[in-house]
Amino acid sequence: MTSDFFKYQAQTTPHPLAMEISHANGSYIYDINNKAYLDFVAGVSACPLGHNHPKVINAIKKQLDSYLHVMVYGEYILKPAVELTKLLAKNLPLPLEKTYLTNSGTEAIEGALKLAKRATGRSQIIAANKAYHGNTMGSMSVMGYEERKQAYRPLLPDVQFISFNNEADLEHITTKTACVILETIQGGAGFIAPQNGYLEKVRNRCNAVGALLILDEIQPGIGRTGKLFGFEHYNCTPDILVTGKGLGGGMPIGAFTASAKLMDLLQDKPKLGHITTFGGHPVIAASALATLQEITESNLMHDALEKETLFRQLLVHPLIKEVRGIGLMLALIMTSEDIANTLILKCQEAGLILFWLLFEPKAVRITPPLTITNEEITKGCAIIIDVLNSIS
Ligand SMILES: Cc1ncc(COP(=O)(O)O)c(C=O)c1O
């Protein structure tokens, strides 16, 4: 299998981890030798209920027995998709009311950018340095990391970059701006949270010049920061909210949500303003609905903040410069890139899954399932400290 993996399946780095998976359950992933790995990454924040959560699996199986794909997005009434969008609306502040379901996060970003242009009749997009919003051409155009995008230029025109948390830069948002797009908490940059009322100030500036605010909650969303959406910490409601990853409960999804007035623009002039074959797929919507129900009806969000405290108590070591982030969206900032690499690889050998962040080479990702137990946290942190002791 390993040689076929390298021969037939396209890779995106020269050295993928290449662990062959047998099965996964709860907070554990098992390789083909039945070695158990405690998962501190949760599919890069995409498995908030861990692996094979019974409520998610049951919802998927039930839907499998009824129907799979039957028609392109938005024509037929598919109960799981309707119930999912309704439950999202119930848990969001107005005017966020109507949701478009897509197949991935990046596709939802594309839809959100298009909607902002369509709604304002303007073309300028303002994004943040070190932002990550996905890898299709539009999303890549608003990625604030030149090294990874220069080979793909020309990208979208009229995109300008500002520095996240820099208040002075907000003057670049003007009456020419269609939208400002930001991650609520910058992920790839190193889990950087907004400071000093930054998002509220962005919101006010957008209001003043008639620009729309798009918040990308693909990573912080769905309970990871202790609230259903990260923006709820910051007194700032976006015009367009983009979600994905964890919303699918381990299945591929993206979504963008806005007011009915904004969203309805996609119906007309031109009609078919954003189309997809598989978006809102009934099996995926069923998985997402079960996930969202479990997260909103349980104590998982509340517990995320207590679990953060436990991580912070246990992860104290001279090689850890800082523990960044909120709730169960945490990053260890190590003293060097080498230490970060060694820690991730040695922990994998020792049965603990950690991972990198996109643009911050000294960072080590800790984004476990929200369902992780205190015992599992204690066990995983002991592995980290042991490995760090062996390095130093
Ligand atoms: C903040 C953010 N936006 C967008 C995306 C893109 O989502 P997807 O990989 O589902 O296209 C990601 C994925 O890592 C992300 O973290």
Image (spheres, helix red, strand yellow):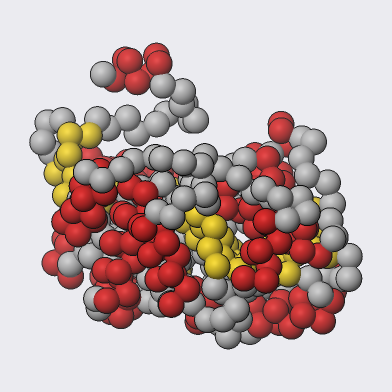
Q: Is residue 16 left or right of residue 375?
A: right
Could you say which quadrant of the image residue 236 lies in? bottom right
Identify which residue is drawn at 13% across, 38% down: 35
Q: Residue furthest front?
A: 76
Q: In the image, residue 98 lies at what x, y percent?
A: 55, 67
- Residue extending farthest left: 34
Q: Residue 223, image x and y in percent?
A: 38, 70
Quadrant of the frame with the N terminus: top left
Determine which quarter of the picture holds residue 325.
Answer: bottom left
Q: Is residue 391 above or below residue 226?
A: above
Q: Using residue 12 as the reference point, say whether residue 170 is left or right of it.
A: right
- In the image, residue 251 sits, relative to residue 321, either above or below, namely above
Q: Is residue 207 visible?
A: yes
Is 376 placed left or right of 270 in the picture?
Answer: left
Residue 156, above or below 133: above
Between 261 and 184, the residue placed more toward the observer is: 261
Residue sitting nearer the eye, 97 or 108: 97
Q: Is residue 38 above or below residue 316?
A: above
The x, y position of residue 126, in whole percent, is 76, 61
Residue 389, can we see it? no
- Tell me: 92 left or right of 212: left
Residue at position x 39%, y 31% from top?
Answer: 16
Horizontal and vertical percent for residue 217? 52, 64
Residue at 18% across / 53% down in the picture?
58
Q: At 36% from the left edge and 58% from the top edge, which residue is drawn? A: 79
